[in-house]
């Protein structure tokens, strides 16, 4: 198909659920994406935080190719060499979190964590944070606060209650002896790149312990080096009971997982499961991805590059910018107005960025982004936010 045929065909057959951009990407390498005419774009979307390792990482690609000729599918009732390798890595990430459940996406990992907290505690109520995002299937959607995602799909799962983020008093009131779980992102991604306070996360742990409530940390976006540590919760000296991850776990191959702490009980045969979960292909990709994250020190890279990027962004003098914030390479630039025209202007200059809420530009570049690419990103942002203000919807 030529370019026109590709766009016409997708436009005709799309579900309609996505706002399409008129660019056809056909390949990627590191932090770059290339369109059908081989024009290069700097990718600060990373597929919403999937491509932490960059695109087409050679070690992940080789692992997928090799495993695809050996064995791709095997239900978790049987043992497998690749799954054992992955469990050995993941089961030793965090002290006291030795068990792992595998699934195929972020929302599935949240669904599983919610179910595990209910069966473990014998309770049904779940407390979640306002502006939090946990996915779009019915359980995860019930934990997600924004009405933009919920409207039209009610009634959702009963028993969910939302409290303001970073507010300890509200947690004290909301969590009771009826609460199965508290679910939080420690850096809210979709909601606007809001970083949790130290005192808040530590209070969350204490309040959960006081009431026998399980603490679920959703690291689907913040995991695997993104914030400068393997997991964002490691900035807080707090251990969760359940940790949800997905996005970057298998280097681009769909995969989700839940790390399970010692307080979680009653996970017996048949209580939950997944056909594709823990399949050898995804496991082999994840082993290669996690090994590369460690070998290339990508968490440390994210910390250093994030500090460099945030300092440069804070030095931009633009009347449009309200605040620059973030952790590692999970960065938000809050504007005083809606971001859509600015994202479009960036895209015209071959830089891809995301929104987070209505007024925040979100940058989630691959952790392998080079310093030259960061400098280029800042230059283009400066052009758009300082030089280009007159042209945009004021
Ligand atoms: C993306 C995301 C999800 C949902 O993941 P999917 O793979 O799209 O289902 C859940 N939680 C957080 C924090 C996310 O960023």
Image (cartoon, rainbow, N blue to C red):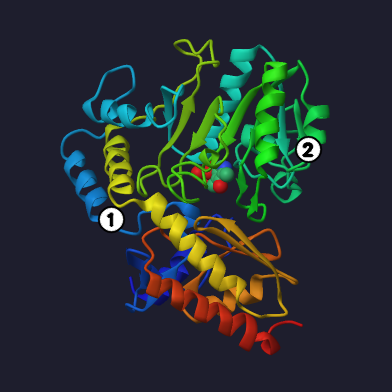
Q: Locate the C terminus and report the quarter of the image it occupies.
A: bottom right
| Residue at x-position 45% and y-position 62% | 305
Q: Locate the N terminus and report the quarter of the image it occupies.
A: bottom left
Q: Which residue is mark 2?
A: 163
Residue 331, image x, y percentages? 57, 60
Residue 34, image x, y percentages? 35, 72
Residue 371, image x, y percentages? 39, 70
The relative height of residue 152 versus residue 266 in the rendered view (above or below) is below
Determine if residue 305 is in view.
yes
Mark 1 vs ligand 1: CB under 8 Å? no
| Residue at x-position 28% and y-position 18% | 78
Q: Nearer the viewer, residue 93 or 178?
A: 93
Residue 195, image x, y percentages? 64, 50
Label 1, label 2: how far apart the Cα atoms are: 40 Å
User: Quarter of the image holding residue 344?
Assistant: bottom right
Asked which secondary structure carries label 1, the reply is loop
> Could you say which disc has been placed on residue 57 in the image?
1
Mark 2 vs ligand 1: CB under 8 Å? no
The relative height of residue 197 versus residue 332 in the rendered view (above or below) is above
Q: Nearer the viewer, residue 136 or 233?
A: 233
> Could you say which disc has been placed on residue 345 in the image?
none
Sequence-first tag of 1 and 2: 1
**Local crowd at mark 2 within 10 Å, few (<14), some, or many (≥20)?**
some
For ligand 1, give the image quadrant: top right
């Amino acid at each position: 198909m030529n370019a026109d045929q590709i766009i016409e065909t997708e436009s005709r057959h799309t579900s309609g659920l996505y706002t399409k951009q008129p660019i056809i990407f056909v390949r990627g390498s590191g932090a770059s994406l290339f369109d059908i005419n081989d024009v290069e774009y700097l990718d600060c979307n990373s597929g919403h935080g999937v491509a932490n390792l960059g695109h087409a990482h050679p070690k992940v690609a080789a692992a997928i190719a090799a495993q695809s000729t050996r064995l791709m599918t095997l239900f978790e009732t049987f043992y497998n060499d690749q799954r054992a390798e992955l469990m050995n890595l993941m089961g030793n990430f965090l002290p006291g979190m030795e068990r792992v459940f595998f699934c195929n996406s972020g929302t599935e990992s949240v669904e599983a964590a919610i179910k595990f907290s209910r069966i473990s505690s014998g309770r049904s109520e779940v407390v979640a944070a306002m502006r939090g995002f946990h996915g779009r299937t019915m359980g995860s959607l019930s934990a997600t606060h924004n009405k933009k995602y919920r409207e039209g799909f009610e009634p959702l799962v009963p028993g969910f209650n939302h409290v303001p983020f970073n507010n300890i008093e509200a947690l004290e009131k909301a969590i009771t002896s009826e609460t199965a779980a508290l679910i939080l992102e420690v850096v809210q991604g979709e909601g606007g790149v809001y970083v949790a306070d130290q005192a808040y996360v530590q209070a969350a742990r204490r309040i959960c312990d006081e009431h026998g409530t399980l603490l679920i940390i959703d690291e689907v976006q913040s995991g695997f080096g993104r914030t400068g540590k393997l997991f964002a919760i490691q900035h807080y000296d707090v251990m969760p009971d359940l940790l949800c991850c997905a996005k970057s776990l298998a280097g681009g191959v769909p995969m989700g997982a839940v790390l399970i702490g010692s307080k979680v009980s009653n996970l017996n045969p048949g209580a939950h499961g997944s056909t594709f979960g823990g399949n050898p292909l995804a496991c082999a990709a994840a082993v290669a991805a996690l090994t590369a994250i460690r070998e290339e020190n990508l968490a440390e890279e994210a910390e250093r590059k994030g500090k460099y990027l945030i300092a440069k962004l804070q030095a931009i003098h633009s009347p449009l910018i309200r605040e620059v914030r973030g952790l590692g390479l999970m960065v938000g630039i809050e504007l005083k107005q809606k971001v859509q025209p600015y994202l479009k202007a960036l895209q015209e200059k071959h830089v891809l960025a995301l929104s987070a809420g209505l007024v925040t530009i979100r940058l989630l570049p691959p952790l392998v982004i080079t310093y030259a690419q960061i400098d280029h990103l800042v230059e283009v942002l400066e052009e758009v936010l300082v030089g280009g203000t007159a042209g945009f919807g004021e």
